[in-house]
Image (cartoon, rainbow, N blue to C red):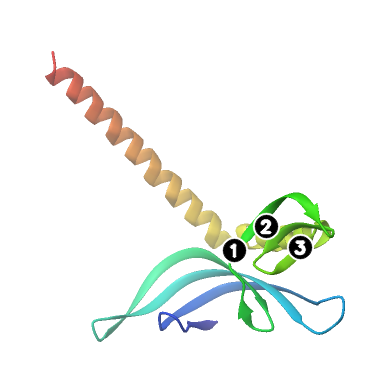
Amino acid sequence: MPGLDKQYAIVYYMVMIKTMRWQTRDGKHDLRIEVELITEERINNDGHIVTVPCCEIRETASVDGIDQGWLEMLDQPINGAVARWGKIGLTAERLAEYKSLRAEVEATPEWQAHLVAVERGLAARREYDAHVASMRQAMDV
């Protein structure tokens, strides 16, 4: 499913998109949180369109279609909200719903394969660092 990031003019392909929607108590504003799993991006590389594999989770929140920044946990509840996403206050129930959407996206085979690849890369880096440390120690004798 292609999407378009208008800020950077990048076309990206989503494997999964999960959305939660609701309205404010007075019914005047439409609130929306989306969690997307993106596996490919088509970028403009000096005039050449290139498809780049990636695996990332993008989360967006909007009020009436206007983006709202990032998720922030509150130290103390304010008017029933335990977290805030820009101007959107999340109650404990809405936060739990968001966390379940995020968990669904993280449970996909693509994301799990990505985590395995990252761990493999970290293990190789640890092995390399250990080798460098042992060589430094051998050379310092």
Q: Is residue 123 above or below residue 6?
A: above
- Residue 17 placement: quadrant: bottom right
Label 2's element?
A: helix
Q: Is residue 91 above or below residue 35?
A: above
Which label's residue is closer to the chain start, 3 or 1?
1
**Mark-to-mark CA distance, 2 and 3:** 17 Å
Q: Position of residue 105 (x, y in %)?
A: 63, 63
Residue at the image position 44 percent from the left and 81 percent from the top: 7
Image disc number at residue 103: 2
Label 3's element?
A: strand
Q: Is residue 60 above or below residue 100?
A: below
Residue at the image position 54 percent from the left and 75 percent from the top: 14
Say left or right for 77 vs 70.
right
Closest to the observer: 109 or 22? 22
Q: Position of residue 123 (x, y in %)?
A: 39, 39
Q: Amino acid at mark 1?
A: Trp
Badge 3: few (under 14), some or many (20 or more) residues near its Cα, within 10 Å? Answer: many
Q: Dot 3 corresponds to which residue?
A: 90
Quarter placement of the C terminus: top left
The answer to whether marks 2 and 3 mark residues whose Cβ atoms lie closer than 8 Å is no
Closest to the observer: 52 or 88? 88
Closest to the observer: 50 or 33? 33
Q: Dot 1 corresponds to which residue?
A: 70
Image disc number at residue 17: none
Label 1's element?
A: loop
Q: Amino acid at mark 3?
A: Leu
Residue at the image position 46 percent from the left and 78 percent from the top: 12
From this viewpoint, which residue is outermost toward the top? 141
**Mark-to-mark CA distance, 2 and 1:** 18 Å
Residue at the image position 29 percent from the left and 33 percent from the top: 129
Quarter placement of the N terminus: bottom right
Q: Nearer the viewer, mark 2 or mark 1?
A: 1
